[in-house]
Amino acid sequence: MAGLAAPAMAVHSDSPPEGGFGEAGDATITVPINDSAAGGTYYQPFERAYAGETEDGTPVYVYVPVGTFDTATVEGVHSLDPAFDHDETDEFVPCADNSADDYVLTQDQVDYIGDALTDQILAVNEEHLGELGAAASGSDALVTLVYNVQDDSYYDCTVTSYTAGYFAPEYLSAESLGMNVMVLDAFDWANRVGEDPSAETWTDGDPSNDRPELYEGVVAHELEHMLMNYSDAGELSWVDEGLADMAAFLNGYDMTGSHLTYQQVFHRETSLTRWGGGLENYGASFSYFLYLWEQAGGNGDGSLAPDLEYDGTAGDLLIHLIFKEQADGMDGVQNAIDAYNVETGANLRSAEELFKDWAVAMKLDDEDSELWNLENFDLGPASGGWTIDLANDVFWDDRGSYRGAQPDAKWDRLKNRPGTTALPFGVSYETFRNPGPQVSLEFDGEATTTIEDHSGDEQHWWAGYESQADHVLGLDTAVTGGETVTFWNWHFIEEGWDYGFVEALVDGEWVSVPVTDVATGDVVSSDDDPHGNNTEGNGITGTSGGEYFVDEPVYVEYEVTVPDGATDLRFRYSTDAAYLDTGWFIDEVSVDGEPATVTPEVDPVSDEPDWVLIKGEQVNQWVVQVVSTCDLTPGVDTAGEITDDAGNVVYRFEGDADGDITTGVLDTRCANGNAADFFVVVSNLATGELAVLDADYDFDVVNLGAKGRR
């Protein structure tokens, strides 16, 4: 029996290479890979599979795990074979159902992606958004890594979605690769690369599996994150992710599918402005920015289809200004709209008014309406098969859909009424058919939502809500070592990804110290470092006084012992580049039982303090919109009534200072019939010191009878 020689493969290592990671353009480089599901970091050799250069001279490289092209199968290729387990000692075992055949890469595929990036995507992204900078090494080369990303689906066979790509800011740093790096997953390139995968050399012969240009879209998306990191690294995820999907759209790639589908199905569970990381969040933020682009005129020539050209006006200009704006979140969007109106002389509506119209458009999507329509998408079968109506009726078992009159007794016990908790900048849609000849809607929402301080003086220190930041609160009281520092704190910190640290200055270096719960004596800080964000150790993460995402955070007293030789102490809140929870509050700091004072550091760029002393109050701005295809207030010029050119009528009611709304008489006889209806949109446009909290409301339908009275 003749033996077959195994291909030369480079195995991973648990330790970084002694000779360094290499440089962009080298034949091989070694990459530190973080396992986002199982945790831990390992070091994988990659080989250069593509080298190109853009028109303006930017080098472009694509790397794959060493051994990728040495065999017809990927079995045994580290970081590509789905059976590869970089840590066989932990509890995580790769899913046995994942087939190695689905991860085979070809040189033709890699060349196709490399050429798309070199010839189009980088130029389109830079022109519409911002420029690529140089990493810590000084090189502006653009590196794409392709491997089998270890995510939840890597280990759990029941998980049907996967991480198609990502950008990791740490690769830019001198402590890591010092390169401009983004990552693509290796799954199913045979069906997901090319305008028509079935017409390419790599086709699997089954056109029904095709998802054309999926990875080209991922490249454009992840590249936006890299550009944003150079432009405004602290930008909130909902803006960054929405603009990343816009980058794929502006490159002409099809953006129908999972993001919009999930938004339609999970609309009520989705906040536009509080990033949750689900596909529905991508759908909400992308569709919001697409709506803004269309409402501003799309391309400069007046068309509403992407043309790959930056026109410097209309929607192209607005998206460019939003990307460049240094203020974050909705404030930044509003600043960009203001700048757009000044520059163009336009009168584009405010960010909040556009949100209200977007909320109507995402359900109504009337192709004949210039106001409440997404021109580029026909929500429904053409965008994944689901609509909000279908989702409420089928997926959510007739949720929020009512037929006939709704007297109090019936209304109060309806099982299909959705909950009455609103997410910030979220939407809840409820549909009424034949509710009675005349009705009124009565709404009572929480006027404010507050995270109460511990001391009772209505102010406490908050570390803010900013991605990819280190916010420092310094202790003013002198320490020399041995003192006990206690502080009351409330924290809801993304578990395992973001951390709070108590640090002491010892021999000129800041070192983290263990933190203990005063009441229980338990150490609440941890040295666990699943994702490389707790290298210092002694990190505080998760929920104070309870289990993360199970219990509500509460104020708990913690303490630390100042190490010998320390000359200073501080509190530091460190966040990564993605999801944020509410964060970290601190109150009543003491040193050896005596009240102490603290002072936040000031950001040298923004000139703003890192921590802020606030009451912790969110002001709830309630909006109830009633949408009909006929006039529900005939003969009356109703405040907040808006009509379009397609016969749609929207009644926009704003909550008063107490959060109350009464619509007055709505004559619904014109909306009666088997197919006729009107729907209600409930939203909370939260503002104030905090704008990320849920808020409760009560909502009633009052049947006034034929003569306008109950």
Image: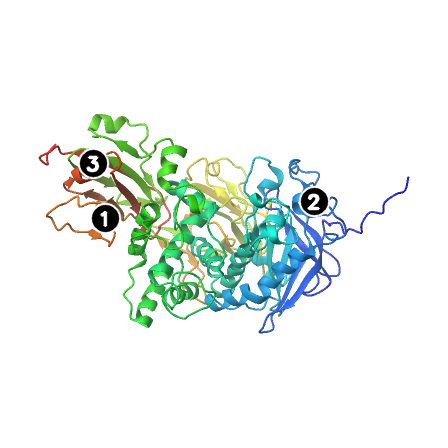
Query: In the rendering, at what x and y percent does residue 148 appear?
Result: 64, 48
Which badge, 2 or 3, comes first in the chain's sequence? 2
Q: Are marks 1 and 3 in contact (CB under 8 Å)?
A: no
Neighbour tally class for label 2: few under 14, some 14-19, many 20 plus, Cα within 10 Å: many
Q: Are marks 2 and 3 in contact (CB under 8 Å)?
A: no
Query: Disc 2 to disc 3, how far (Cα)?
Result: 60 Å
Farthest right residue? Answer: 1
Q: Secondary structure at mark 1?
A: strand
For this view, does 630 lie left or right of residue 180?
left
Query: Disc 1 to disc 3, how far (Cα)?
Result: 17 Å
Q: Which residue is mark 3?
A: 672
Q: Which residue is mark 1?
A: 650
Query: Which quarter of the image is occupied by the N terminus?
Result: top right
Query: In the rendering, at what x and y percent does residue 151 appear?
Result: 59, 44
Which badge, 1 or 2, comes first in the chain's sequence? 2
Which badge, 1 or 3, comes first in the chain's sequence? 1
**Residue drawn at x 35%, y 50% as measured from the top left:** 691
Q: Which residue is mark 2?
A: 81
**Depth check: 95 or 113 in front?**
113
User: Is residue 393 visible in this depiction of the protein?
Assistant: yes
Farthest left residue? Answer: 707
